[in-house]
Image (cartoon, helix red, strand yellow):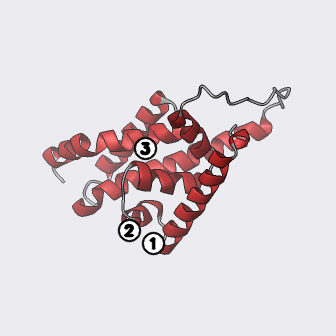
Amino acid sequence: MSRVLYNEWVDCFADGIYRFALKNTRDSEQAKDIVQDAFEKLWVKKDQIDTSKAKAYLFQIVSNALIDRARKAKLSATFREQLPSQESIVVSESIDLKETLEQAVLQLPEIQRHVIMLRDYEGYSYDEIGAITNLSEQQVKVYIFRARQKLRSILVNPELIV
């Protein structure tokens, strides 16, 4: 891979990867770091990557980074002192639909959140999602189906939104 091709990939794929990372982290600085790390890893393995699969490779790197960060957060939470419980958040009627949907998506299990975002937010095919997440096409369909069912149940019962 040449520098010119690499720079073209940065121009073509950086925005989509950033949106995906941002939707999962909800922190623009973390999302930028994840994207930068992904492109760094792409450059390191530039001679080993099939050029037709570069986009899937980048999303796979980002997906793995998000999983690693979630695991580290869970691990550190178990060692942190338990904070006094706060009152549950009451969802007011003034919250718009987009915000409500984002909150509902955040309640999904990690793999379901990843596949639903890749499918519904980024528009990837089941095949492409399978390549990105190392799942079979059938597994991807099952996770998306379950995610949509859970979203439906959360959105029907607004008191479930945390």
Quarter of the view holding residue 123: bottom left
Q: Is residue 149 left or right of residue 135?
A: right
C-alpha separation, residue under disc 1 versus residue under disc 2: 6 Å
- According to the picture, the residue beneath numbered tag 1 turns out to be 137
Query: Residue 78: percent from the left, percent from the top?
Result: 78, 40
- Rendered residue at 37%/37% (across/down): 36
Q: Residues within 10 Å of mark 1 (few under 14, many from 20)?
A: some
Q: Amino acid at mark 2?
A: Asp
Query: Residue 68: percent from the left, percent from the top?
Result: 57, 47
- According to the picture, the residue beneath numbered tag 3 turns out to be 20
- Rendered residue at 49%/57% (across/down): 115
- According to the picture, the residue beneath numbered tag 2 turns out to be 127
| Mark 3 secondary-structure assignment | helix
Q: Amino acid at mark 3?
A: Phe
Q: Is residue 19 left or right of residue 82?
A: left
Query: Residue 93: percent from the left, percent from the top?
Result: 63, 28
Q: Identify whether 96 is placed above or below 50.
A: above
| Mark 2 secondary-structure assignment | helix
Q: Is residue 138 left or right of residue 58?
A: right
Q: Identify whether 159 is placed above or below 133.
A: above
Pick whichever, 135 or 149, lies toward us.
149
First reached walking from the N terminus: tag 3 or tag 1: 3
Residue 161: image tag: none
Q: Residues within 10 Å of mark 3 (few under 14, many from 20)?
A: many
Q: Residues within 10 Å of mark 2 (few under 14, many from 20)?
A: some
- Image quadrant occupied by the N terminus: bottom left
Pick whichever, 48 or 86, lies toward us.
86
Q: Amino acid at mark 1?
A: Glu
Decide if residue 61 is in sight here. no
